[in-house]
């Protein structure tokens, strides 16, 4: 009786195999739902960071440049989307709307604080009713409909110098070369690198000062980490990749990808210095937290890492 079919549920599969298949399909569906939800939360964060009117920003930059034209040698516009909300702690090149390269050689012997104040003073002369303030790295101009960050850079030898992460010393840069390199790597990764860097800097902004990368260093690391990246180009996957790869780069000095003669991470000292090891360990811990959140399929744990309330 009953014919010669292959198993109770038909076909050649046993009941145990069918149950396993159903469980695998359920787990795959749960994984996909989890990935979609976390990427949705990340996308909402990035939308908050980048909710800016590009036309309005461009108009305000023109106003700023006009106000400073007699002091400006050149500018480098970096309209990646503007600063993240915690810019006091995460300033870096990709947070900046424009680099303003000043041509006044009298600035060469001034401190970073003095140069920024010079810049603020010149702006206030021309824009007296505008809220203008000096931060750790950049100068922020608050218009009625937008907040713009600009970075004053003083001419130095064959390049320019900007305030270092501690705001007490100078860092020598080739800004156009760096902007071009960042744009190149960003383009290679479908425009995903700059958003990921913003997320990285937002996450590390919650760390104690002695465990935090500088913004410029985080950007330089991203160029190294993603220049040959072949993985899945979603914010979540790339964010995990950054925190998995960054520790091995942090333990030793890296030369700026633009070819400048100094390192971008001199503030951490020599190779395998205590400060480098501390920061590398901190970054690795964040990477492990992400792995654990994935293992538990916990949206709540991801929100905790991102500093986002559900």
Image (spheres, rainbow, N blue to C red):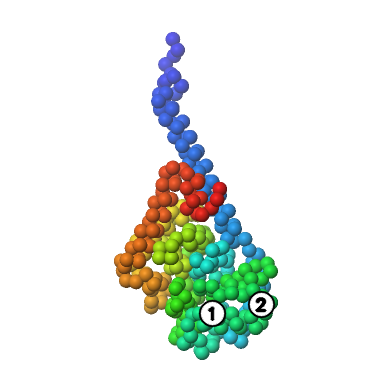
Residue beneath the point at 46% across and 31% down: 22
- What label does residue 116 carry, if any? 1
Camera sees residue 196: no
Which residue has dot 2 on it? 63
User: Would you identify the image quadrant in which residue 144 lies?
Assistant: bottom right
The residue nearer to you, when weighing 7 against 95, is 95
Regarding mark 1 in the picture, which secondary structure is present there? helix
Q: Which numbered disc, 1 or 2, marks the residue that appears first in the sequence?
A: 2
Q: Position of residue 231 (x, y in %)?
A: 43, 54
Camera sees residue 3: yes
Q: Position of residue 93 (x, y in %)?
A: 50, 70
For the residues labelled 1 and 2, say whether their Cβ atoms are less than 8 Å apart.
no
Q: Is residue 166 above or below residue 228?
A: below
Mark 1 and mark 2: Cα distance apart in space: 19 Å
Residue beneath the point at 47% across and 67% down: 215
- Name, please, the residue furthest toward the top: 1
Q: Position of residue 270 (x, y in %)?
A: 32, 71
Q: Is residue 16 above or below residue 88?
A: above
């Amino acid at each position: 009786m009953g014919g010669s079919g292959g198993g109770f549920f038909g076909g050649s599969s046993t009941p145990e195999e069918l149950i396993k298949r159903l469980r695998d399909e359920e787990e795959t569906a749960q994984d996909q739902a989890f990935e979609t939800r976390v990427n949705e939360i990340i996308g909402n964060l990035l939308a908050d960071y980048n909710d800016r009117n590009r036309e309005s920003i461009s108009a305000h930059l023109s106003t700023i440049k006009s106000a400073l034209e007699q002091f400006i040698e050149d500018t480098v516009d970096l309209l990646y989307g503007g600063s993240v909300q915690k810019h006091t702690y995460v300033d870096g090149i990709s947070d900046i709307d424009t680099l303003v390269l000043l041509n006044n050689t009298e600035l060469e012997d001034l401190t970073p604080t003095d140069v920024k104040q010079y810049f603020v003073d010149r702006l206030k002369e021309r824009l007296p009713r505008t809220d203008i303030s000096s931060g750790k790295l950049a100068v922020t101009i608050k218009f009625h409909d937008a907040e713009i960050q600009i970075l004053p850079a003083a001419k130095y030898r064959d390049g320019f110098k900007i305030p270092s992460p501690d705001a007490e010393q100078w860092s020598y840069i080739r800004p156009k070369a760096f902007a071009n390199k960042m744009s190149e790597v960003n383009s290679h990764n479908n425009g995903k690198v700059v958003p990921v860097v913003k997320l990285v800097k937002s996450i590390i902004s919650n760390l104690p000062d002695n465990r935090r990368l500088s913004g410029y260093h985080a950007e330089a690391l991203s160029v190294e980490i993603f220049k040959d990246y072949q993985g899945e180009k979603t914010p979540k996957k790339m964010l995990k990749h950054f925190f998995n790869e960054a520790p091995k780069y942090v333990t030793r000095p890296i030369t700026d990808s633009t070819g400048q003669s100094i390192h971008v991470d001199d503030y951490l000292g020599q190779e395998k210095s205590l400060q480098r090891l501390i920061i590398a360990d901190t970054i690795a811990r964040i990477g492990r937290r992400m792995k654990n959140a994935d293992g538990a399929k916990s949206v709540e744990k991801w929100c905790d890492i991102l500093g986002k309330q559900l």
